[in-house]
Amino acid sequence: TANFSEQVVESFPSDISTGIYYGWACVGNGDVHKMVLSIGWNPFYKNTKKSVETHIIHTFKEDFYGEILSIVITGYIRPEKNFDSLDALISAIQEDIEEAKRQLDLPEHLKLKEDNFFHLPESKTVNNH
């Protein structure tokens, strides 16, 4: 899971609805992977600030702190909601991941995986990745 900085979150379009989205993510100049994105109100800041969390559907061998994270949001899964238990939250997250995988295998979403957007110029890469 990767969180965007407050500065990046504040630059998101203000009219984007909170909720769960899916799309593609790329760390540095690495491979492009499926992802689920949560846009929501952060209780830590008394729900006055939005947070954006990216769950990349891939297991990385090492941390990628400080790397550039590029994302393309291609669809919407559901609105943000509270859960009665941790088990209910975990179950919803698993359902969101499965839905994202199904949607991203569709040709109209799959073609975006190859978009030039994900190929950073060498001067923009961090840690030689």
Image (cartoon, helix red, strand yellow):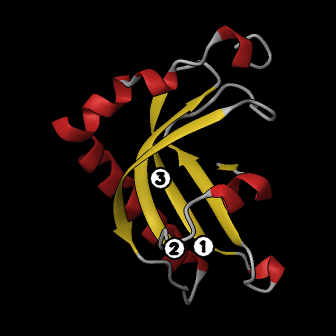
Q: Amino acid at mark 2?
A: Thr
Q: Earlier in the sequence, mark 2 or mark 1?
A: 2
Check residue 18 in the rendering and tell me which mark sits there, or answer none.
2
Q: Is residue 50 left or right of residue 89?
A: right
Determine contact: label 2, label 1, CB under 8 Å: yes
Q: Amino acid at mark 3?
A: Val
Q: Residues within 10 Å of mark 2 (few under 14, many from 20)?
A: some
Q: Amino acid at mark 1?
A: Gly
Residue closest to the eye, 79 or 9: 9
Residue 52 locus on image (x, y percent): 63, 60
Check residue 40 in the rendering and tell me which mark sits there, or answer none.
1
Tell me the quarter of the picture where residue 38 sits.
bottom right
**Which element type, helix, strand or loop, lies under badge 3?**
strand
In whole angstroms, how far apart are the C-alphas of marks 2 and 1?
5 Å
Residue closest to the eye, 11 or 46: 11
Check residue 36 in the rendering and tell me which mark sits there, or answer none.
3
Q: Residues within 10 Å of mark 3 (few under 14, many from 20)?
A: many
Residue 70 higher or lower than 102, as above or below? above
In whole angstroms, how far apart are the C-alphas of marks 3 and 1?
13 Å
Residue 128 higher or lower than 92, as above or below? above
Residue closest to the eye, 129 or 101: 129
Q: Is residue 70 left or right of residue 113?
A: right
Q: Residues within 10 Å of mark 1 (few under 14, many from 20)?
A: some
**Which residue: 39% across, 61% down?**
96
Residue 57 locus on image (x, y percent): 48, 41
Determine contact: label 3, label 1, CB under 8 Å: no
